[in-house]
């Protein structure tokens, strides 16, 4: 490849001194080598992103150099371009995997996750403002175009000294091959999970290739699962007979995961809220039983958890979600509707058209617009959870209908990025929400430490749980059956690496017969499930619930 400043082509029309030109050329070559090695050795799991993880000898680099040495000059230039472009795309894939492992504790899905770009833009806009979202989108666009180009130019740059010094290059490559073989034979590594004899680039490419094939095959497999519904043809008069006359609420609490009740950073304070709440509710005549469900998602993707619980199917990706929405699968709220309940959806985070509503088929649906909040905005949440609860009650109370209701309620004050939340106030003073004002000087600090983020997460969960407990204590009656659960664990910045996908779930009611019905579930008394509480997959809940509360 020609020098960056060939003879007669310098900026001022005067050639720089030969020594300076040599130093600049060598510096560019060193930077090109560093970029290529960084892309090859960059871990694609956020939990392994440490300086020691870069101490590796990538086999793919040795094979590429050997190929360049074996080819004629003309062909080696073409191969260098192809290898550089492929390596640039690999670098992008690694960065995507890093981001997804940090936020969602899973790898990027090249078939399905492109749809999340729109969700990510909306999240940034709601949390940090549209200018920030646009700036991030522009930076990503530059990265998507720039990284493959830079890596390709770097590989082409390196080809010249490698091929120009065949004898020296051959010796170095031979020595590195010996080192690689020895390290592979004895499994030598500097840190766990990062062997010096590295083949991670090939492993990554093969893994995502298998993932693509799996996604394509899953379309047909999942379609068959939808049709296998043991309750699909059950008449309405045989559904939910043990809950006749009850007003049932299923309330999802954003990011309320198992760590909230077990991690030492959160459990003492959140556990105190739950224990105190159970005592307060007990004094008002309510009992509670609690367990755990395993969510299909982690750190985000609440809609997947909602769909899993309600449909009785494992919805762990958007392809399955879209397939479900196009089907006539009976959901849990659909079972209530078939059994002559009025069904209600309350989604304060919905700010635009929501096509999912036609699948779930609510009789009444309240989004951010219809809840008509007039107070301050608290980061991502369109309104505080206490206002959502009060507004929903006010709107439903205004109706003159004696039929029982089943409500799906989504609470979002504990949504990332976990910024300030209001205090629980007297229910009589809520009104249109204008009383909810952010404290003077409060701001969504983007430079918070991980410790501060965790503290803010804990505070937001405490706020939502206190709001729910206060609501049931204030307005609950003999006909209320309140089911509260988390949708997923918070992101790894809160939980750390390798956290479970489990979320707490509780059933609260005054009716002892309802609690007696679930005695066979093994759930524990109170609002706080202990370490030994049963754990079910979230997709098992629908069928267990319908079986338990069906005809004896």
Image (spheres, rainbow, N blue to C red):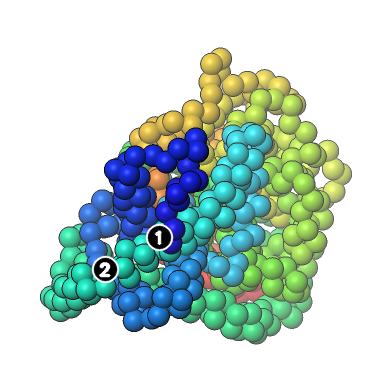
Q: Is residue 360 left or right of residue 243?
A: right
Q: CA distance from mark 1 to mark 2?
A: 14 Å
Kindly state the secondary structure of the residue where label 2 is placed.
Answer: loop
Depth check, front residue: 359 or 528: 359
Residue at x 64%, y 70% (from the top left corner): 319
x and y percent of residue 63 in the render? 32, 77
Determine which of the numbered discs, if any, sits on residue 165 in the image.
2
Name the quarter where the N terminus is drawn.
bottom left
Depth check, front residue: 147 or 398: 147
User: How dense is the environment of label 2, judged by Cα within 10 Å: few (below 14), some, or many (20 and up)?
Assistant: few
Q: Is residue 324 left or right of residue 212?
A: right
x and y percent of residue 526 in the render? 43, 48
Residue at x 40%, y 50% (from the top left corner): 492
- The quadrant in which residue 502 appears is bottom left
Q: Is residue 270 above or below residue 40?
A: above
x and y percent of residue 269 in the render? 37, 35
Q: Is residue 509 above or below residue 423?
A: below
Kindly state the secondary structure of the residue where label 1 is placed.
Answer: helix
x and y percent of residue 244 in the render? 71, 61
- The quadrant in which residue 549 appears is bottom right
The answer to whether residue 97 is seen in the rendering is no
Of the residues under marks 1 and 2, which one precedes in the sequence?
1
- The quadrant in which residue 412 appears is top right
- How many numbered marks does the figure carry? 2
Depth check, front residue: 174 or 285: 174
Determine which of the numbered discs, if any, sits on residue 270 in the image.
none
Q: Which residue is mark 1?
A: 157
Q: Residue furthest top?
A: 440
Name the quarter where the C terminus is drawn.
bottom right
User: How dense is the environment of label 1, judged by Cα within 10 Å: few (below 14), some, or many (20 and up)?
Assistant: many
Residue at x 65%, y 29% (from the top left corner): 377
């Amino acid at each position: 490849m020609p020098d960056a400043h060939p003879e007669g082509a310098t900026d001022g029309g005067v050639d720089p001194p030969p020594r300076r030109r040599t130093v600049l050329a060598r510096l560019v070559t060193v930077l090109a080598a560093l970029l290529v090695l960084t892309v090859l050795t960059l871990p694609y799991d956020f939990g392994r992103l440490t300086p020691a993880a870069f101490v590796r000898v990538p086999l793919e680099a040795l094979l590429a150099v050997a190929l360049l040495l074996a080819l004629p000059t003309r062909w080696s230039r073409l191969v260098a371009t192809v290898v550089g472009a492929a390596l640039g795309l690999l670098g992008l894939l690694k960065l995507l995997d890093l981001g997804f492992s940090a936020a969602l504790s899973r790898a990027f899905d090249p078939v399905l996750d492109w749809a999340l770009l729109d969700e990510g833009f909306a999240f940034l806009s709601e949390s940090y403002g549209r200018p920030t979202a646009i700036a991030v989108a522009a930076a990503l666009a530059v990265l998507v175009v720039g990284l493959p180009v830079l890596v390709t130019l770097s590989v082409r740059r390196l080809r010249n000294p490698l091929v120009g010094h065949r004898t020296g290059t051959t010796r170095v490559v031979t020595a590195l091959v010996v080192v690689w073989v020895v390290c592979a034979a004895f499994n030598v590594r500097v840190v766990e999970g990062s062997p010096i004899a590295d083949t991670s680039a090939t492993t990554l490419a093969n893994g995502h290739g298998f993932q693509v094939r799996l996604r394509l095959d899953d379309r047909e497999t999942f379609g068959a699962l939808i049709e296998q519904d043991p309750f699909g043809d059950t008449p309405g008069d045989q559904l939910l007979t043990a809950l006749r006359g009850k007003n049932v609420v299923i309330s999802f609490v954003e990011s309320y995961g198992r760590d909230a009740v077990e991690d030492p950073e959160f459990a003492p304070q959140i556990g105190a809220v739950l224990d105190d709440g159970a005592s307060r509710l007990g004094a008002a005549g309510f009992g509670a039983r609690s367990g755990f469900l395993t969510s299909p998602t982690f750190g985000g993707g609440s809609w997947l958890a909602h769909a899993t619980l309600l449909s009785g199917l494992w919805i762990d990706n958007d392809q399955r979600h879209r397939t479900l929405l196009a089907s006539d699968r009976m959901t849990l709220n659909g079972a209530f509707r078939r059994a002559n309940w009025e069904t209600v959806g309350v989604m304060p985070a919905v700010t635009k058209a929501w096509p999912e509503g036609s699948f779930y088929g609510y009789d009444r649906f309240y989004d951010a617009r219809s809840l008509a909040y007039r107070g301050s905005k608290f980061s991502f949440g369109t309104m505080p959870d206490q206002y959502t609860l009060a507004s929903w009650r006010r709107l439903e109370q205004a109706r003159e209908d004696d039929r029982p209701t089943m409500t799906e309620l989504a609470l979002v004050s504990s949504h990332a990025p976990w910024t300030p939340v209001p205090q629980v106030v007297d229910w009589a003073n809520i009104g249109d929400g204008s009383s909810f004002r952010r404290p003077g000087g409060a701001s969504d600090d983007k430079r918070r430490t991980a410790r501060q983020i965790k503290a803010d997460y804990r505070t937001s969960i405490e706020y939502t749980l206190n709001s729910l407990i206060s609501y049931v204590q204030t307005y609950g009656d003999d006909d209320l059956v309140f089911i509260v659960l988390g949708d997923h664990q918070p992101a790894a910045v809160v939980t750390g690496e390798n956290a479970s996908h489990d979320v707490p779930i509780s059933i609260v009611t005054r009716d002892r017969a309802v609690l007696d019905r679930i005695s066979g579930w093994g759930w524990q008394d109170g609002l706080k499930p202990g370490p030994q509480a049963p754990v079910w997959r979230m997709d098992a809940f629908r069928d267990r619930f319908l079986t338990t509360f069906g005809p004896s």
